[in-house]
Image (cartoon, rainbow, N blue to C red):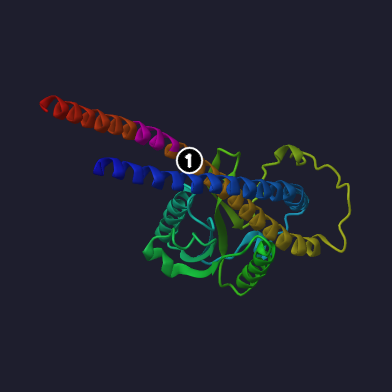
Amino acid sequence: MSNLKSLKKRIHSIESTKKITSAMKLVSSSYFKKAEKRLYAAVPYTSGLAQFVDSVLYWKKVTEFPLLRGGKGSTHLLIVMAGTRGLCGGFNLNIGRRANMEIRQLIKEGKNVKIICIGAKALSSLEMIHKSYVSKDLRPHDKDSWITVSNLCDEINLWLINKEIDTCSVIYASFHSLLVSEVKSHSLIPYKEDVINNNKKLRVPATSEKIPLLFEVEPSFGAVLRKSALANLKSQLYFSMLETQTSEQSARMIAMDGATKNSEEMLRKLNLSYNRNRQATITRELVEIIAGAESV
């Protein structure tokens, strides 16, 4: 009888867990659709601005701006983007593993490392020894994420001008599909052409003779690049954040779906075990009653 009570208690517990995971899957599905919509809405601006900067640099190799060429020192700023919550499988763990590996490599190269964490789980995913390098721990909400990124990029620009940092890269989760996301690292400073969308087919092909420039830039290439380089940094970083947020929600959906299916399988096995034990108990009691009646 005690075994039956224990099984019944476990069944009730798993049924409660299944309700929670099923509800979280539905909530994550809703958040995922919103995040995916924001991500694809940002593609035209992000890719268009990157293509514009690429095209200007194609004609005029203007590299006197710190945002484009970086500094000459050895201080590297690493931006680590992770999720805001747990219960998303190994999503945050994979980002932390990549970040720790990158930090160790930078230290090995003799770099002075400075870290900015974006997302509630970014800081906790780092190894304890690396947390001393963290200068900022940002946890933006969806509504003010652009403002957070914009202010951060303005601050990065000032750090470059004041020679507090020299190079910068970001670690984030690149979103491919609902089932596939990939932890990536790409350079923000110095600027590398086509780092986001790899739109090589949209660029003017290199030839032995330069094709005449079909548009004029006012007041000058330098003035335009000064503005567009900072805007491009903001759009790249914001796009990386959107990709990470979308990847987090897809990972949570998959994790909760897996947890729900596992709960169903456990319930099936426990119910089968409960019914067998219950039947065995009833049979045993019937045998005892019959044996007692026969003895009388």
Q: Determine if residue 64 is in view.
A: no
Residue 21 inside the magenta-drawn segment: no
From the viewer's perspective, tell me whether residue 88 is left or right of residue 48: left
Of helix, strand and loop, which mostly describes the magenta segment?
helix
On the image, the x and y values in percent for residue 210 come to 80, 43
On the image, the x and y values in percent for residue 70 come to 61, 62
On the image, the x and y values in percent for residue 24 come to 54, 49
Task: List the residue tagged with mark 1.
Answer: 260
Q: Which residues are magenta?
A: 264-272
Which quadrant: the C terminus?
top left
On the image, the x and y values in percent for residue 28 come to 58, 48
* Element on which disc 1 rests: helix
Residue 271 inside the magenta-drawn segment: yes
In-front residue for pair 11/46: 11
Residue reaching furthest to the left: 295
Q: Name the image quarter holding residue 272.
A: top left
In-front residue for pair 167/239: 239
Looking at the image, residue 98 lies above or below residue 152: above
Residue reaching furthest to the bottom: 162
**Residue lying at 50% horizontally and 44% vertically, measured from the top left:** 256
**Residue lying at 44% horizontally and 51% vertically, measured from the top left:** 93
